[in-house]
Every structure is written in C-alpha cells, then in structure tokens.
Amino acid sequence: MKQAIDVSQLKVDAATRQLVTASAPKKMSDFDKNALEEAIRIKEKLGGEIVTLTVSSEDAKAVLREGLAMGADKAYWVNDSSLQNVDTWGTAYVLAEMVKKTGEYDLILCGDSSLDSFSGLVGPRMAEILNVPQITSVGKVTVEGDAVVAERSLEDASESVKAKMPALISVTREINQPRIPSLMMIMKASKKEIVIWSLKDLNIEQDKISPRTEIVDVLAPKMERKKIMITGESVQEIADKLAKALVQEGVIGRK
Amino acid sequence: MSENKGVWVYSEAYDLSLELIGKGRELADKTKTELCAIVIGNNVQGKAADLIKYGADKVYVADNATLETFQAEACLGILHDVAVTYHPETFLIGSTRNGKPLAARLASRLSAGCIPDCTRLNIDEKGRLVGERITYGGNAFAKITFRTKPQIVTVPSRAFEKPEMKDHTGQTIKLEFQVESPRTQLVERKPLATSNVRIEEAQYIVSGGRGLDKKDDIAILEDLAKVIGGQVGFSRPLVEDRKWSTDWVGLSGHKVKPKLYIACGVSGVIQHVAGIRDSKIIVAINKDPEAPIFEIADYGIVGNLYEVVPALKEALKKQLQ
C-alpha cells in the first residue's frame, strides 16, 4: 500500500516548470485501495487475516489508519530515512523481505500501478523475488480452494488465468468500488496495531537496495498549442470557420 | 570498463518490435554498438529474417512449437539466459500488458534497473541513456538514467516510428534454451471484439466526455467520425462511472496520437490530456469557457456540443466534397 502524491492537487511553478511536490497533499494510491477492498471482500467470504505493507521514508500513518479503518487487521510499515532515494528495485526488495518476515500467506494483492509514479513494476518485481506465481492487470479475482483464478485484460484479449497460492495479483481500478469507512470503523481502527520496522529490523544492508536508476529531472511539459478560440454569429458560421482552419492545417482534405 | 554491450530488443507484439528496432538502431549507432533482436515463437524464421532488413545486426531466435502463444516464464527464462550469456548493455522491451511485467521480472532477476514506458530515449552529452516518461498523473515528464547495467527500458506502442525495410544485412542465430515451466495456467482466452482499428492507430478521433447526456448521444459523435474517417473515443468517467464502453483515452487508458483529435464535452483533466498530448491538432468543444481542455487545444469552441458537433459535421462534409 503506497502513500502517493495526490496528483490531482499537484501544483506547477509556471516559471521553472518544477512541480511543487513538497507541499502536495498525499493519499492512499487509488489502485492500492482497490487491492485492499478486494482483500476485504475475499476475507468477508472466506475469512482470514489481512495485513497491509507499506514502504515509506515519510509519515504514512494517516494512510495506514485509513487501510485499517477500511478493514485491514494489521499494518506493517518500514519507515527508514535511508529509503528516500529508493527506486522500484529497492521498494520491491524491501516489500519481499517484509512478506518473508510476516510469515505464511496465501495471496498478495497490490495495485497495478501507483497514482503518482505509475510505473507498474513493483508488483511483478516482488513476485519474482518471492518466486511466486503472478497475475497482472486483473479485473476480477476468485479464490478456488488452494488456487486463485483471475481475469486479466490485455490489449487485444481478455484472459482467465489460474495460479496456485501463494501468488501475487495486481489489480486495476475496474475491479471494484472501494468502501468509505464509517465513523465506527475509523474508531475501531484506532485500536489496531501498526508495526514499524527499520531496514535493520529486516536485516537489509543499505547497499542491497541502492537505486539502479537516477532521476535527471522532472519537469512539467511545455504545452505549445495555438489556443485559438473560434467565435461567430451562428453555430454554422463557427463550424465553417473551424472546418476551413482544419483544411488549412492540412489535417483535413481531399485525398 | 563495462563489459556490457549491445542494444537488445524484444517484444511479443510484432509491430512494436519493429518500432523498437527503429529506435534501437539509432541508439546503437550513437553508441557504436550492435543492435540485436530476440524473436520467440513458433515458426518465426521468416520474421527473424525480416527484422534484419528492418535494421537488426543479429537476430537471436528461440523457435519451438510450445512457444506459439506468449508464455511469461518461458520468455523470462530466455531473456535471462541471453542476459547472462551475452551481457547486453541495454534492453528495449515492448511495454504491453505482458511485456512490462516481463521486463520488471527480468530486472529483478538481474538485480537491474528498469525505466518503464519511455516515450523518448536519447543518449545525453555524457553518453548516458536517458529515458523520458510521463509521471505524476500527466503533470510532468521525468528524465531518468541508469546507475547500473544492464539497463532495461520498456517502450509503449507507437512511441517511435516503424522503420522502413531496407537491404540491411545481418545474421540470425539459433538460441539453445530450455523452456522454463509456466507458473500460471491459462483457463480461457477471449479475443476482444473490436470491429474498428485500434484507437492508438486512428488518425482521426472524435471523443466524448461528461458533456454527453446519454449513451444514445454517442451517435452524434459517430456521425462526425464517419465524415472524417475516424473513430470515437471516450473519457474515463464515461467508462468508469457510466460503463458506456470498456476503453478510455487517457494516461491510464489508451494514449493516442492522431492527426486530429476533437474533444466534445471533455473537461480536460490532466490524466486525459496526458493521453492526447501527441495529437497533431486538438479541437475542444465545451459549453464551459473555463474548462481546462481549452488550455491545451489548438482550436476551441465554447458552445453546446449538441449544436456544434452536427454543424461541424456538415461544414466538414462541404470541405471534403
């Protein structure tokens, strides 16, 4: 479960094209919320225990509490200042070590991508490190005995795929509509446990998770559009003006 | 000091693999190295020979009857073998729904870095490979480079041009490999019913957003699309909230780059804009003069789409006659 920057509230410094990320509001990455919702639905049917795993060098308590209020039983959080420059390699490595330390599990559910960086790499990397089957781009999950059956959407087809558990599933936004916790659930969640670990608690050497990639810069795109507003006395006149402009642009014309 | 060399490309999607060859050729020439392609499948010798004509110096072929359809573990095993045997400097892997997780897994198996969904790739003045990708929900482009090798990059479809077939020469090499056994079992595969060309390929797109009142009104957009020989697209709310379609245009949906994109009743949130940014000309029709879509449009009309779109259809018909 990632604490992500709420990209819809991100501001850009027009002069430098830099993003104002430091003061940007944070929230639970929306795909991860779908993953947690799905876990809760599976638990409602089949029982079991749900734990959430979060890797963040920043204060992620509010997001962890929200997960607990939705229905997770326990939250694990690796909070370590040396995670600041971690990339997908390191994040997945730490998550995999967390999974190992928490013990036995049946199913790992994660978001297909995160709201802010939108890489879609951490889930598959994690499954690879844990050496468990993985199914990505999942819009529907069913647990059948010791196996999980998932429907995934590809560019040109949809697939139904079965994997023996333990397995990892990464879900898309379409899978469900996450619940909004009631006041009662929020109050109940305040008694649930948040376990905080450092890298040392997981016996992870700093070197092991050193970033494989390096950000050169992050800049808002230049939008060089003409921004010509077409006006006129009547809809017909406006439409004619636009049609002529499109012909002049060379995008519309007789072949 | 690096022993890693060569630009290596792989995609299970043939068209995308050609686009990777086009870009890979450019990167290989700039860094004075070889361009190698990997082909995995059944009876793929013909394809392998074609990849040379498109620009590959060497094509490594894993040809086996069991590889008729894409298998994640088999591909992963083969790519991993290649990495361990030949020490590529750079991998370009097609960023499809199957290709991206494959790249991610390969990267972790090799303790390597991966930059996903690069829409631009260049060698900078320091000789580093720099990938550019959309991030923060379309609010920014991040330029990222590597600290370690191999460097694994995934590239979405249509980010780069498909090269011309030339009389380039090279060699095909048969890979010796063992098929890694699958970890998942395919229960059923249903091809998506698409009568039209895929929207990524469309040259003309008329898209609808929340300004449309009801599903039947899509017909208005279809009429306009028909006149210009285009396709209809949707913004995310029409798919997620109203379930009018299964696919939307936007960063998290289909990224498009038509000659002409006509947005009808689309407000233009950054998520949508990030998916249409590469369009040649963007037209916006919206009744709200404050709609952000006008900020990124070439031509804007403030008005009721139910009046403007049919009028535009007639006006374009006249121009095309």
Image: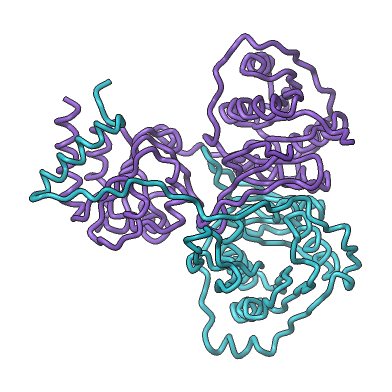
Chain colours: A cyan, B purple
- Residue B231 location in percent, x, y? 34, 37
Query: Is A83 placed left or right of A219 in the picture?
Result: right
Q: Residue at x 78, y 79 (%)?
A: A195
Q: Residue at x 20, y 48 (%)?
A: A230
- Residue B296 location in percent, x, y? 37, 51
Quarter the C terminus of chain B occupies: top left
Q: Pick whichever, A23 or A76, lies toward us.
A: A23
Residue A55: name its quadrant.
bottom right
| Numbered marks: total | 0
Query: Is A122 placed left or right of B176 in the picture?
Result: left
Q: Residue at x 42, y 52 (%)?
A: B273
Q: Residue at x 48, y 49 (%)?
A: B253
Query: Is B294 placed left or right of A176 in the picture?
Result: left
Give the vertical position of A185 relative to B251 (above or below).
below
Q: Pick whichever, B235 or A220, lies toward us.
A: A220
Query: Is B193 placed left or right of B157 in the picture?
Result: left
- Residue B163 location in percent, x, y? 56, 22
Residue A103: name its quadrant.
bottom right
Residue A203: name its quadrant.
bottom right
Give the vertical position of B255 relative to B2 (above or below).
below
Q: Pick whichever, B273 or B78, lies toward us.
A: B273
- Residue A248 location in percent, x, y? 25, 32
Quarter the N terminus of chain B occupies: top right
Give the vertical position of A120 relative to A1 (above or below).
above
Residue A104 visible at all: yes
Residue B195 visible at all: no
